[in-house]
Amino acid sequence: MFFYFSRFLVRLGLPLFLRKLCVINLGAVPERQPVLLASNHSGSFFDAVVIGAVLSQPIYTLTRGDVFRKSQAAYWLRAINLIPVFRGSEGRENLRKIDATVEECFSVMKRNGTVIIFSEGICVNEWNLRPLGKGTARMAYQAWYGDDAALHSMAVLPTGLTYEHFRGTNKRVVLHFGDKIESRHIQTDPAEYEKWLREFNALLTKRMRQTILEVPQKATSDESARQLEKYLTVCPRPRGNALLQGLGVVGRAINRPIYRFYTKRVAQKTRGTVFYDSVLFGLLMYTYPILIGLLALIVGAFTSWMAGLAIFVGFPLTALAGNRYRNDHSR
């Protein structure tokens, strides 16, 4: 239940946070088939938020196990369909946990569910695909050649997210679903396990690279900006008329104090990490409606309920206009 409530808030909140979300090849996502959705990982938890907002089916996301250490956090993370994943290299005690994680993923997929795995195994805010770990390949191998026939039809779906930037609102995002990979696409004999894993990873890498922007590591900031702008021509900036531009100015003015209240504290809490966007969006998603609701009640109680209603509706609508319809230098 909490998952569906959260997804409802995500779908309401993303248009206020993103300037524009462009989805490419959504029809490639199977709806009646087990799916292991293999995504790049440049935006931390926010990657799963964006993907989950677009897909109609419930999704489960493999998430680093250390964030589940506190029982209260684990409860709420589980409530939004996050599954802890552990590294065998971090200790023998994690090996059993890894087996349990795989079984949980297979249980989801046997019901034609979708599981997101971040195949790079690490999150870095950059426009590049890092070398893939073996986790995705191993899970595909177990599904396709295991004893459970319900998993033999599983599809691995290469998926890419490209962000205009990695710091707060006012960004365009391209979500690109690639061509699915099935067992028939791997030519190596499954008996040659390590060779099979290498071929799988080579194919997955190739197809994932087709879904994202990659900027050379040695590129200057100006070169990176030019390549990014060229790539984002598939996701043009919204162009509003004078009325929408005016509403945008109002929206930025009245929402800026609230936004800066959040950004200052989130920046302090997430300094030196890749979690800024994830934490900022999560806090805004759950608390902004409460904050505006309380403000509307107070205004309504001391003036009129029509004024309160205007506050409750006007703040988010002008925030939407403020985020979408702005010049490139306004913040």
Image: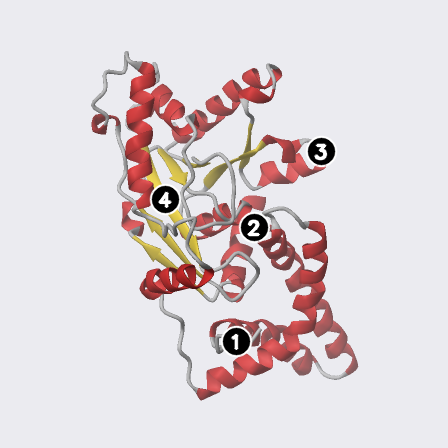
Q: Residue at x 51, y 49 (%)?
A: 125
Marked residue nearer the N-terminal end (2 or 1): 2
Image quarter hosting the C terminus: bottom right
CA gap between label 1 and label 3 equals 41 Å
Q: Is residue 111 left or right of residue 66?
A: left
Looking at the rendered structure, the kind of residue marked 4 is Thr
In the image, 54 versus 111, the foreground residue is 54
**What residue is disc 4 on?**
159
Q: Which mark is first along the chain, 3 or 2?
A: 2
Image quadrant containing the N terminus: top right
Q: Residue furthest right?
A: 302
Q: Secondary structure at mark 1?
A: loop
- Between disc 4 and disc 3, the foreground one is 4
**Above or below 67: residue 318:** below
**Residue under circle 1?**
329
Q: Would residue 145 be visible to someone looking at this image?
A: no
Based on the displayed image, in which of its 4 quarters is residue 292 positioned? bottom right
- Label 2 or label 1, whichever lies nearer to me, is 1
Rounded to the nearest angstrom, the CA distance separating label 4 from label 3 is 31 Å
Residue 56 on image: x %, y %: 40, 48
Answer few, some or many: residues within 10 Å of disc 3's Cα (few below 14, many 20 plus, some between 14 and 19).
few
User: Crowding near pointer 4: few (<14 within 10 Å), some, many (20+)?
Assistant: many
Q: Amino acid at mark 2?
A: Ser
Residue lying at 28% horizontally and 51% vertically, measured from the top left? 25
The answer for how far apart the CA atoms under marks 2 and 1 are is 32 Å
Q: Position of residue 174 (x, y in %)?
A: 39, 56
In the rendered structure, which disc, 4 or 2, sits on the residue that comes first in sequence?
Answer: 2
Closer to the observer: label 1 or label 4?
1
What residue did someone put label 2 on? 6
